Image (spheres, rainbow, N blue to C red):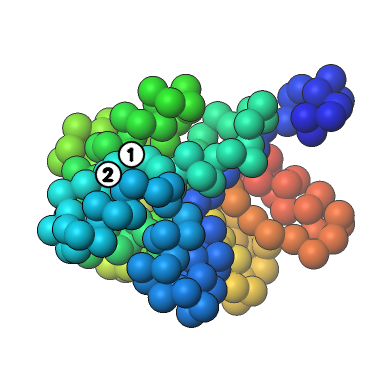
Amino acid sequence: MRQNPAKYAHFNVYPCMPYAHKYANAVTELGIMGTIKQYVPGNIFGTFAKGGLAFFSKDFSKLMELLVDAEMKMFKGINTPVIFLQNVLIDMILGLKMYEVFADYDAYIRKKYNAEPGYITMNMPALVDALHSVGISNPVICSSINKIGFRMSGGQEIYEKYLKEKQFRAIAMQVLAAGALRPKEAIEYLGTLPNIESVLFGASSKGNIDETKGLIEKYVG
């Protein structure tokens, strides 16, 4: 894309980080401290090693910024209008109730990359409340939304309630519920819900893409 900027001028890329498998593999091979040393530049590692968990708690946001920068290097010169945090990290932060990290991430992505922060989660209602609690309004949230409640923490009813009553920009994923739903049935259900701005789906062929895209345009708009 960098080599042919005119050809790809209208393409957008939406990074999702962290690349969890990379870090999981590194922890297996190097251990936790070895992984931090591998991916975090020099002097902060020395401070971390001396300060232990107290330092980690105090300066987690600085560590977050360094890791974001490391992940974003490959996208230099590419249009990245929204930069997402993966649910593996989002849901951990939710569980730890470290909501200020979301505020720090939001501010950093806007300032450093002139982009919108995005959030992927398996618990959309809890995330909406957490983001609003630290002053983040109308966030971009990607979560499972489907007709049978697959991976919708808290249940389908509360998801529908939040889509109707809360202010955020919803991206629906896992809409086919891992193959349990046919595309037409799945997309028709999305069409009954308000506030869904985008649909994220996977496909194994051009025909699948065309079919699902057509259904989205028909029922979701």
Q: Which quarter of the figure is the C terminus placed in?
A: top right
Dot placed on the residue nearer the N-terminal end, 1 or 2: 2
Name the amino acid, label 2.
Answer: Ser
- For residue 169, which numbered disc appears in the image? none
Q: Which residue is rendered at x = 80% and y = 59% of the image? A: 208
From the viewer's side, name the closer residue of 37 and 118: 37
Name the amino acid, label 1.
Answer: Tyr
| Farthest bottom residue in view | 28
Q: Is mark 2 on a helix, strand or loop?
A: helix
Q: Which residue is rendered at x = 17% and y = 58% of the image? A: 51
From the viewer's side, name the closer residue of 77 and 143: 77
Question: What is the number of callouts on the image?
Answer: 2
Q: In which quarter of the image is residue 109?
A: top left
Asked whether residue 165 is in view, the answer is no
Q: Do the residues labelled 1 and 2 touch (CB within 8 Å)?
A: yes
Q: Nearer the viewer, mark 1 or mark 2?
A: 2
Pointer 1 residue: 105
Q: Position of residue 216 (x, y in %)?
A: 65, 46
From the viewer's side, name the closer residue of 62 and 174: 62
